[in-house]
Amino acid sequence: MMHLLNPQFWTFVGVVAGIYGLLALALYVQFSMAGLPNFGHVAFMAVAAYTMALLVIRAHVALGWASLAGIAAAVALGFVLGIPSLRLRANYLAIVTVAGSEMIRYLATNLSVTGGPVGSMGMLGPTQFATYTTSWQPFINGVTATLSRWVGGVATNDFSMLCLVWTLLALLLLLFRRLEKSPWGRVMKSIREDEEAAASLGKNVYAFKLQALTLGGILAGVAGILWALEIGVFAPDDFQPTLTFYAYLILILGGMNRVWAIPAGAVLFGALYSGTRFLNFYPLSLVDSGDRAYLRLLIVGVVLVLLMAVRPEGLFGKRQELLLEK
Amino acid sequence: MASLLLQLIYNGLVVGAILALAGLGATLVFGIQRVANFAHGDYMTVGAYAALLLDVTWSTNLVVAAVGAIVATAALAVGLHLVLLRPLRGRGLVALSLITVGLGLVLRDALFLIEGSQARQYAFNQAAVLNLGFVRIAPGELWAGAAAVVVVPAVAAMLAWTSIGKSMRAVADNRDLAEISGIDTDRIGLYVWLVAGALAGLGGTMLGLVQGVFDPNLGFNVLFLVLTVVVLGGIGNAFGALLAGFALGLVMEVSTWPLFFGGVPTQYQPVVGFIVLILLLMFRPQGLLGKAQVL
């Protein structure tokens, strides 16, 4: 049993919460602003991470360029799923994204180029150990060395990652707050509320939806690459479909219509995510540690249902602005 | 090669029957209750495990187990409708979809906690393959095929000729007109969940039989195929869903035939389903039997 106040563990939880926060922000753009229900967002993370790793490992592309290509691949996935379904009602997008994310997982598990079930380690075949972090490691070590000059021994690589992820998230939140209040953001919300009305004012609804899908794809791509860099090696199982619903939970916990609620939701989620590890009292002690992951998902499901049923605007959301009639 | 094709057609019809039954329930729920049920796959899993409990733990025969699965899943579907989904009616499709996603997580992970993640199977001799000379039918597929032969025509007849079936199709087609002509849509809502749950329970059991071994991800793994059937048949179109289920099942199985462009490797079958979905949305979003309209 790990100590409850183990700082390394909580730093890691903080990084995870920040990355899921980024994914939640991606959903915020698509779901809260434009009213597009993307139920397979994890696939965008996976596509970005796989593209990046494949380019680094097999084509020896520099990590920075490979990451950009990964993000572009996530956007491309958005087009593949969005172009056939965006002209239809919102539910078609939900269906096609669920299907798309299953597809990506199938392909990642079954293709040999993606390393199959082994994942990134097996990208050069079973005999050779493949890694995409060769140039990332010295960089993050450098960041840690710099940080340790100010904060001393607290600085670990996870701590550096924590600072990077949350700084990025904070900057993006500022940016999106501006965007939301801009004319562009207001058109988005008008599309969410009433597509026909927006179209009658001469707004190209389809183009705006595609923009929301693209922005969401970029953000999810960034989240996917950060996640891959944080965990060092990844397999198809690191991109379980449930990740998408963690992000929804963050969005709903914090409040569906307030961009500032995302970090609050991420922190609450981090507590929930890690909390099940420490809940060792009766009756939860009956559940052995291997099954805790299922318990966690069960709780996520219960919280999702309860929040949507009782407080659909989230803990800090505005009740006037609800995404109801869609 | 020809006997392999026959084999694949038989498999396709059995898988198709499963998809047709599950898709029929999902499309009626979608059309009548205005819920895109993302927990539908997990309803199927509940059915498969209910049958497992009866068949293996209480060692009843498979027919009793399947009936038990139907009853249990129908009860679950109706119960959740009354307790959760009906009170939340009017929350909008997307909010309700998200609720069913949460519901699916709860059901699936409750099964993982109770039953564990190990692969399970029904208590029949999987090696007793029926050899008809040109086709060989595994016992699980034989049972599932038998269930399909009984249930699919019965369900189709129910939809076509009984007043309940007609009312269901009427409400799915146009709720307001149905209400005006005196159909109690609230009562129909209850029946729809009853039928959808029963068919999901049976479909899940059949899927468990066909797969041989399964874990609590059984139904979730085919959820997107069930949703594809819903779209393929035209949302809310009962006969469309039946037809679409068989069509998708056949396409997925026959696409692995070596004479069909060398045959799609078996593990990529779901990809075929996905391509069908994307093409469908691009060229015929109203589905096979749907009327062209604003979607």
Image (tube, rainbow, N blue to C red):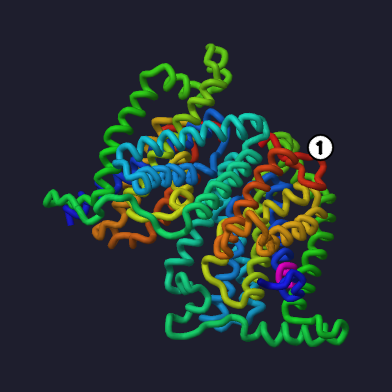
Q: Nearer the viewer, residue A322 or B118?
A: B118
Q: Is residue B154 above or below residue B6?
A: above
Pinpoint residue A206: horizontal percent, then vertical percent: 65, 46
Look at 60% across and 52% down and name the residue there: A298
Q: Nearer the viewer, residue B278 or A271?
A: A271
Pinpoint residue B127: horizontal percent, then vertical percent: 22, 56
Inspect the image, locate mark 1, and give the three-letter code of the amino acid beneath it. Answer: Gln
Residue B262 part of the magenta-drawn span? no
Query: Which image quarter holds the C terminus of chain B?
Result: top right
The residue that label 1 is drawn on is: A320
Q: Nearer the viewer, residue A133 or B79?
A: B79
Left or right: residue B4 compared with residue B292: left
Q: Is residue B259 above or below residue B30?
A: below
Left or right: residue A101 compared with residue B247: right
Tell me the quarter of the picture where residue A90 sits: top right
> Few, some or many C-alpha atoms within 10 Å of disc 1 (few <14, some 14-19, many ≥20)?
few
Magenta stretch: dominant secondary structure: helix
Left or right: residue B29 compared with residue A223: left
Pinpoint residue B51: horizontal percent, then vertical percent: 38, 43
Look at 75% across and 47% down and name the residue there: A256
Query: Which image quarter holds the N terminus of chain B?
Result: bottom left
Query: What residue occupies the far right of the structure in this picture?
Result: A150
- Asked whether the viewer can see residue B228, the reply is no
Disc 1 on helix, strand or loop? Answer: loop
Q: Is residue A42 above or below residue B238?
A: below
Q: Nearer the viewer, residue B108 or A208?
A: B108
Look at 72% across and 69% down and name the residue there: A15
Region of the chain picked out in magenta, as a range: A11-15
